[in-house]
Every structure is written in C-alpha cells, then in structure tokens.
Image (cartoon, helix red, strand yellow):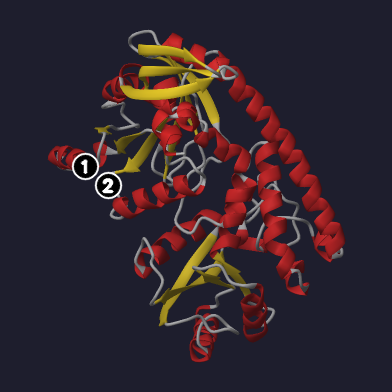
Amino acid sequence: MAKRIAEPTKRPRERAFLVGVELRDQENLLSMGDSLTELGLLAKTAGLNVVGEITQRLNTPNPKTFIGSGKVEEIKALASETLAEVILFDDELSPRHQRELEKVFGEEVRVLDRTALILDIFAQHASTSEGALQVELAQYEYRLPRLTRAWTHLARQAGGGGGRSGVGGVGLRGPGETQLEVDRRDIHRRIDRLKTDLEKVRSQREQRRNRRQRSRIPVVALVGYTNAGKSTLLNQLTAAQVYVADQLFATLDPTTRRVDLATGSPVLFTDTVGFIQKLPTVLVTAFRATLEEISEADLLVHVLDITHLNVRAQAESVLETLKEIEADHIPILTALNKIDRLADPQAARAALETFPNAVAISALTGEGRDDLLTAVQEQLYEMFSPLEVHLPYSQGKLISLFHEQGQIERLEHGNGGVFIQGRIPGRLKAQFGAYLRQQESEN
C-alpha cells in the first residue's frame, strides 16, 4: 500500500493589532475609523491577520512614544491578550518613536508603520526590474535612519515575489540580513547606485516619450485610487491582459497600449500605479520615473470607484497627489467606474451631475465604454482652446505644431519670433505655457 505523503502546511498569517491616532489640528481626508479600515485592507494584502484595533486623539504626538504612555501600556496588554505579533501604526513613525516603542513591546512583538507596510506590498507586487529597483531604493531610504539591531529580523532580499510570503511570516520585505549589518557608508553607496540605475531608466523613458511625441499620438494616463479599476479598464479597452485582483496595489508597473478611436484617430492608454492617502514620500521619490508618465500625458482619465463610501475623499487624495507631482495642469476626464454594482442605475446619473466632465462606466462589463472613448475623442481631437502666443524662432517645433494641429486666426512675424492667435487642442495647451501673450505682457 502506497504511503501517503503529507502536504506541506501553509505558514499561518501573523497576527496584527492596529493603532490609529487622530491629531486635533491635523486635516485628514478620511476619518480615523475609515483610515483604520483601509489600514486593515493593506494588512490583509500584505498577509497579516488583524486581531484588534485601538485609537487615540491627541493634541500633539508624544515626543518619545508617539502615543501616550498609558495607551502604550494598554496596547501592550491587548497585544498579549490577542497574541498579536505585530503592532501596526496608521501613521509614519519617526526613528525615535520606532526605537522607543520597540523597547516597550520587547523583541517578541514587531512595530511597523503604514509606510513600512506599503513598502512591503510594493515589494511583493514589483514584477519588473525597474519596479524592484524603485522599491529597493525606497526601502533603503526609509530604513537608513532606523538602522538598528531591531531590523535584523527582516532577512529577505528586496524585490519580493517569487512565492515568498509578505509581512505575515518574516516582516518587512527588503534588503537581506547581511545588508542590514553593514555600516551606513555601504548603504549610502548602494542608494547612490540605485539612483544611478533609476536615472538610466528615467532617460530611457524620456526617449520613449520623445518618440511618442514625434509620432503625434496623444497619451491618455489612467489615474486613480488603488483598486478603483484602472487595470480592468485598460484590459477592457485594449485586451492588454494586465494582472487584476480585488486588492490594494495589485499592479505597480505601467503598461501602455494603443487604441484606435471610432474616427480612426490613434491614442495610447497608460495604466499607472494607484494612489492612496498618506502615500509615503519615499515612494513618490523612488517612483519618479514612473510618475512622469502621468505628468507628460495629454489627458488624464481619473477612474473612481463610484460604489465606495469614501469616493469623494479618494478623489480628493488623487487630485492632491497629481498636484504634488506637478500634473494638475493636465485636462481630466472622470470615469465613474463599477456602475454594474449599483442597485439603482439612477445613482450613476446623479453622480454624473456631481463630478465635472464625467462618464459612467463598468470596466468589468464594458458598459459605457463607447461613451468614454467618445469623450476621449472630444477632449483630444475636437476640444480647442483659444490661445495667443509669442514664439521665438528657436521654438520651431512649437511653431510647426501650431500649424499642424491648431487653427490659426492671426499670424505676425516680428523681431525674434512670431505672434500667433488661434485655437489649439486642449491637450497641447500646456506646451505653450511659457510663451502665452498675457504672461509676456505681465512680465
């Protein structure tokens, strides 16, 4: 009789206890409760099992332990009661806060913050060499001021993937144990090398963008809160087969595909990394090359999950991030997604009146797809903006661009340049910003 071989058991998820803090003078897009709910979803995505949560309202953070000393002892007792192995804070902790809290909770309990958790998720989902470089850089820059013996439990190479478990099991995914034992000089050297490698990536991206601009094919960037449905929409529009999952930050690496509109006009659609409130600064910096795909686009399609209770706060968070990366000047078309989940279709029509320049769609079923593409066609090819510019003769490309794609009503040649009055597609207006006639007169 054949002997039955036991199947390997799956590592149990680590137990996490969530801590939320509301500072009275700090403005937040989400309420403390909603923010903790989102943190719980992040924890689940990273492989943690949430066993409890606690909140505190403060005028200012405690300079030593972030939260009050009494609350620290209360959390310590609750962590022991729930067998929690990770204490997860919804805010980024300073290096000092992290060290002091680790002393109180002891070696058996790890202290992580929202930034560390998001970095781990990014490491799990970075599927390209560029994504791995970006995440590794962000991890090193986050860890450098926190470099203590407490980080030696995080023994894993950066990049994630490969079937390794997430935070649940070992902790924050990233540079291996030997890397964490080297001195700061070596880590600075590694950071410099990563920045050099990423600068090469940025240069390559810029070359590709220049080729696209020369081809005159406009670029539409899909932007939105994480899990709003951007990748599903790209798949619906282009059959791109981008990985889709009902979890936060399922895809990180941008994907670009061509779509021919009903009129035959070509458009390049680019899926981009999702945004989230309290997006770590180290990630914005590390993903600069990727985010430039957004800032160089001709049109942004802001994908919103219309069924989400915090849809307005999520929309505001995206708009704030666009401003942070200097992409808020680009025209925006709003796609109110997931209308297939609405019990009352009238709700979608009511939402259209609330959000400007919006189209109701279902990226999953394809409902509203043609309406969206028609709106894109109008924005890119049919919506013209009045413009008066004085272009130096050295800006021959812009002069040619106005002739080729604009409608010239008045043209005068003068010393050093040409004055043009006319209309230009809205997607091109930003390229002429430095030469506006009004700006010139004001100067």
Q: How busy is the neighbourhood of tag 2: few (under 14 within 10 Å), some, or many (20 plus)?
A: some
Q: Residue at x 54, y 29 (%)?
A: 255
- From this viewpoint, which residue is outermost toward the front? 415
Residue 220 visible within the image:
no
Residue neighbourhood size for the residue with mark 1, other residues' Cα within 10 Å, grouped as few (<14), some (14–19), many (≥20)? few
| Image vertical order of residue 17 relative to residue 202, above or below | below
Front in this rendered view, residue 430 or 394: 394
Q: Which residue is mark 1?
A: 342
Across and down, in percent, residue 364 comes to 34, 32
Amino acid under label 1? Leu
Residue depicted at x 41% and y 71%? 26
Tags 2 and 1 in contact by the CB under 8 Å rule?
yes
Q: Secondary structure at mark 1?
A: loop
List the residue tagged with mark 2: 307
Total numbered circles: 2
**Residue 98 screen position, x and y as percent:** 64, 75
Q: Amino acid at mark 2?
A: Thr
> Viewed as shown, does residue 220 lie left or right of 62?
left
Q: Quadrant of residue 223?
A: top left
At 33% from the left and 24% from the top, the residue drawn is: 385
Residue 205's place in the image compared with 145, above or below, is: above
| In the depicted structure, whether residue 343 falls above or below residue 66 | above
Between 427 and 397, the one nearer to me in the picture: 397
CA distance separating discs 2 and 1: 7 Å
Whichever of callouts 2 and 1 sits on the residue coming sooner in the sequence is: 2
Using the image as rendered, state which of residue 16 and residue 329 is in the foreground. Answer: 329
User: What kind of element bears circle 2?
Assistant: loop
Q: Position of residue 402 (x, y in %)?
A: 44, 15
Question: Is residue 268 rendered to the left or right of residue 162?
Answer: left
Location of residue 348 in the rendering, given as x and y in whole percent from the top left corner? 19, 39
